[in-house]
Image (tube, grey):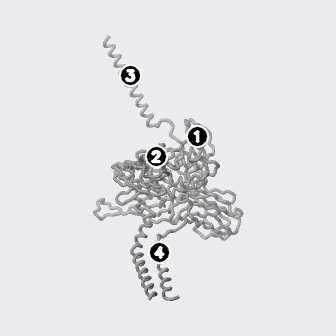
Amino acid sequence: MKNGFIERQSHRVFGLFLIFSILFLPILKISADEFVEIEDVSISAIVGFIEVDEEGDGGGGGGGFSSVPASITFSGIAYPNSPVFVLKNGQEFVQTLANQNALFSVYIPSFPQGTYTFSVVTEDVNSKRSTLFTFPLSIVENVATTISGIFLSPTISVSGQVIKKGNSMIISGQGAPNATISISLKSTLQDFFSVDTNQTGLYYYTLDTGFFPLGLYQTKSKSIKEESESPFSSLISFSIGNTDEVDGVCGSIRADINCDGRINLIDFSILAFWYKKNNPPEKVDLNMDGRVDIRDFSILAYEWTG
Amino acid sequence: MNGLDKKITYFVFCLIFFLGLSLPVTTFGAQIYFDTPSVSVFSSTKDWHVDLLFDAEGESVNAIFLDIVFDETLVEFIHANQDDTIVTSWLESPKENGNHIILSGIMAGGFSGLIDPVTNTKGPAKIARFFFHPKKEGSSEFVFQDVFVASNDGLGSSIETSALSFSFTLSKEGIAQGEIVADKRPPEVFKPMVSNDESIFNGQYFLVFETRDIGSGVDYYEVKEGRGSWYEAVSPYQINDQTLRKQIYVKAVDKSGNIRVVKTFDSGIPVSNVFIIIILIVVSYLLSKFSLKKRFNKSIIEK
């Protein structure tokens, strides 16, 4: 009797578990995949030859073939009328301007064959840069490569390095126009807030610090538009304390050692000067472990803006 | 084992199986390895090369440090070719230090695999190609003594990486890889930048520069201020003329002796501007002369 009861119960539990697994397995898989990377970017290539419609109106007939030089096209969303830079191996290479709807397209013809790390970055109205959108690409002769759907991250700034508890902190920046900005605020717990950008892509969020305990906070933001998401902006730190402290650009951007608002070869060179040397200045020891080593360069590479 | 035990075992097995399926598939660790197009038995009389490759295995990384040990009694390290490297800035470009080859650098913005646009897939990429000169016949291997690969997580955390040793044999019957193609291309065009910061050179102005050379790699740089002499220099370079009035030239020399010279700024007034200034001077001269003549004629008529 007792064994039969246990047997029936175990069958029921197993059955329920099986149904649960079959129902929820796809959901678990999708959420894991979504977490890994942004899938909106499209990479396509035309190899060898393209068919050319000689009549030019799609009327058919009379088509021919034309060879394609190794070329590359980048297109996507930046900020309205913002300058867009293409970096080749971390250095500025080509510049263009996004239109008033924030759309941009860069065509680089006749590119030499090889391996290149291309990055796309834009600049807001305050000359602050987005994070890099990076593609290590193998460029092959006679292949026209197109990378579309690039969605550049918004910029982010805070109104002070230290804000007095109870006062309002302004979190602002620029992103795609008429988009939703999701702001992440992290201390011991992580909170999310959202705000919309206006037609010029600007956004402002007023954070009432009275609801938060004293301590160090990190914030970053991303744009969401028509079911597409940009990567996160760079990470900005601030503290909620007992007094207000407004700081300039210097110190608010991690790894911007010379405080010019950029993280590039200059900051790399300053860091390289202190590599493996004793008693480095506090501001070059990015991970604050008392020395400048490859870990500090990793932080610099993460924050690189060109 | 009675029937109930069997069922419990079966239940536990199914539980583990389905839990395993439900968890996201995760791969841990990147891989660093040597690759060569031919078998690893090389000629003991001809120079040979081997590629050092990096496979991110789905991870996003942005900095690398490697210390590779080789048998200096068997081979001599000639140089490392940095064509097609995924390293965007070298902290230590591959250099010989006794029987070690040490290299470190960053991948700005991160690297998670080299994209092949034709197949739309990500794959391994080259860090560098090492060239060696054989000294005698024998067998040996390249061993990784120290490996650090940093995650592109903004924290500098390390990623578990498997670095595979490379075994090879040098013999008279070994494969000769062919002559090294002569590099006739100069290093790529680059843009030196001037800056200053209190953390180095006591806040004095310095120059930073970096370029890449496809073919043989950059060997060294030289700097010249104004009409002075060329001096071998490394970046960052402390500028002697702190007034920044002098034009500064930077020369990049590759391992084949090809040269690229660039300067910090365009001195003087552009030719087009000079032309406009000359036209303005001529026009204003003619106008003044014309108005003077008119005034002179008017005064004569009045008299």
Q: Which residue is mark 1?
A: B203
Q: Which residue is mark 2?
A: A163
Q: Which residue is mark 4?
A: B19
Question: From the viewer's perspective, is the residue at label 3 or at label 2 nearer?
Answer: 2
| Callout 1 crowding tier (Cα within 10 Å): few <14, some 14–19, many ≥20 | few
The mark nearer the N terminus, 3 or 1, is: 1
Question: From the viewer's perspective, is the residue at label 1 or at label 2 nearer?
Answer: 2
Q: Position of residue A184 (x, y in %)?
A: 43, 55
Question: From the viewer's perspective, is the residue at label 3 or at label 1 nearer?
Answer: 1
Mark 1 belongs to which subunit? B
Q: Position of residue B93 (x, y in %)?
A: 60, 55
**3D distance between C-alphas at marks 3 and 4:** 97 Å
Q: Position of residue B238 (x, y in %)?
A: 60, 42
Identify the amino acid type marked 4. Leu
Question: Which residue of the protein is positioned furthest toward the top in this rendering?
Answer: B303
Q: Are marks 1 and 4 in contact (CB under 8 Å)?
A: no
Do discs 3 and 4 share a chain? yes
**3D distance between C-alphas at marks 1 and 2:** 31 Å
